[in-house]
Image (tube, grey):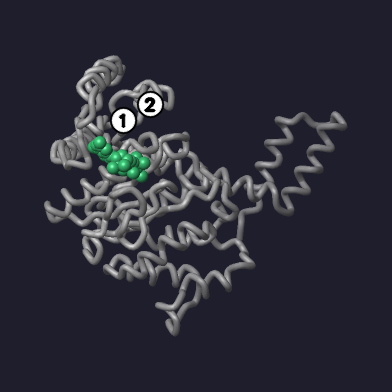
Amino acid sequence: MTIGSAAGVGRARGLPDPARGPVTAELAGAELAGADVAGADVAAAQLVAAAVGGDRRALARLLSAVENTPRWWPEIGAALAGHVGGAQTVGLTGAPGVGKSTTVTALVRAYRRAGRRVGVLAVDPSSPYSGGALLGDRVRMTEHAGDPGVFIRSLASRGRLGGLAAAAAQALRVLDAAGFDVVIVETVGVGQAEIDIAALADTTCVLLAPGAGDDVQAVKAGLLEVADVLVVNKADRPGAARTVADLTAMTRMRADARRPAVVRVAATLGEGIDELVERIAAHRQDLAATGELDRRRLARAADEIRGLALTALQDRLAAPPHDARLAELAGQVLAGVADPWTAAERLLEDIAAQPAH
Ligand SMILES: Nc1nc2c(ncn2[C@@H]2O[C@H](COP(=O)(O)OP(=O)(O)O)[C@@H](O)[C@H]2O)c(=O)[nH]1
Ligand SMILES: [Mg+2]
């Protein structure tokens, strides 16, 4: 996945930060007022400790910080380390209106019946969840309002998809650390960044509805490649059997051995949800048993580190003294006394010789 280039994301820890004072005060917030707050890292550590301990207000504040303030990510990330990795993560993606939110609601119900605590992150501006309710349509999450085993949060798209993907990754980590057994992320499968978000999960479910050439669109959007489970929702409508057959045929053409299961669901009726839960569990068990879970998580961590390192490098190239050195080297290339490759090597050597302090 791509890590966002939001300002300050890659700021090396310890680099002088003029915003550090206000950050501390803002992040500390009301709950931490009066505490011995020495820095943003301390404030983040206290918020994380509270959220890990089950404090929902601290959890909400952390998610707001993650959503709105990328410059806090390093401190929050440092505080979260050691608390993450326990949750089973499930991604749901697909075209708008295919029934993702309805399916999430049905999944939450099923997981709660099984006694599992569920966190939901909706990265779908058309499906704003708020205060436990999914606004719009007929779907309501009010049955879970006041249930401490359910936490629902929507993450608004702010027009910066790279940044959104990075924010979603942090938010998933926060919910994981807060001790939810299952964390579900819903994203509308229309852009690469949003597909990447669903693919952050251990198990990615791609939803389609019968007819309307949905399956063809999904192939075009590259949705089938990220699918661990294919869900044909709205199975109460005509054409569901055909769509299931078409998709099953398509998955047979997949080169890798890990063919997605195809599940028929009618989310509004609750039909097929138990089978979906079973398929998700089976996929996750298979990942763990084959070592693929660790491989995926390692690859994801490497992607994230690479993205952050590149962003940090770009930030440093754009700032003194390296911006001036870059201009100087550009002059040398233009004058014919250096070639761009040698100049680039020199620039990297300069950066390496002057570590961030
Ligand atoms: N007939 C039928 N309609 C459904 C089903 N699941 C969802 N819907 C309807 O499809 C519409 C969009 O659902 P929603 O969950 O908001 O879709 P999303 O945009 O993918 O999150 C709503 O009117 C739902 O009631 C289903 O299984 N059968
Ligand atoms: Mg939705």
Q: Can residue 323 be seen in this view?
A: yes
Position of residue 303 in the picture relative to residue 182 (left or right) = right
Instruction: Give the residue at x 44% y 78%.
Output: 30
Give the Cα separation between the discs numbered 1 and 2: 8 Å
**Placement of 356 over or under 333, stated as above or below:** below
Q: Which residue is the site of mark 1? A: 208
Which residue is more in the foreground, 160 or 199? 160
Q: Quadrant of ligand 2?
A: top left
Question: Label 2: few (<14), some or many (≥20) within 10 Å?
Answer: some
Split into 4 quadrants, where in the image is the N terminus? top left
**Placement of 220 over or under 92, stated as above or below:** above
Q: Which residue is the site of mark 2? A: 218
The reply to whether callout 1 and callout 2 are in contact (CB within 8 Å) is yes
- Mark 1 C-beta closer than 8 Å to ligand 1: no
Q: Where is residue 148 in the image (x, y as percent from the top left)?
A: 23, 65
Q: Where is residue 260 in the image (x, y as percent from the top left)?
A: 25, 27
Instruction: Give the residue at x 49% y 77%.
Output: 38
**Placement of 348 over or under 78, stated as above or below:** above
> Dot 1 lies on which element?
strand
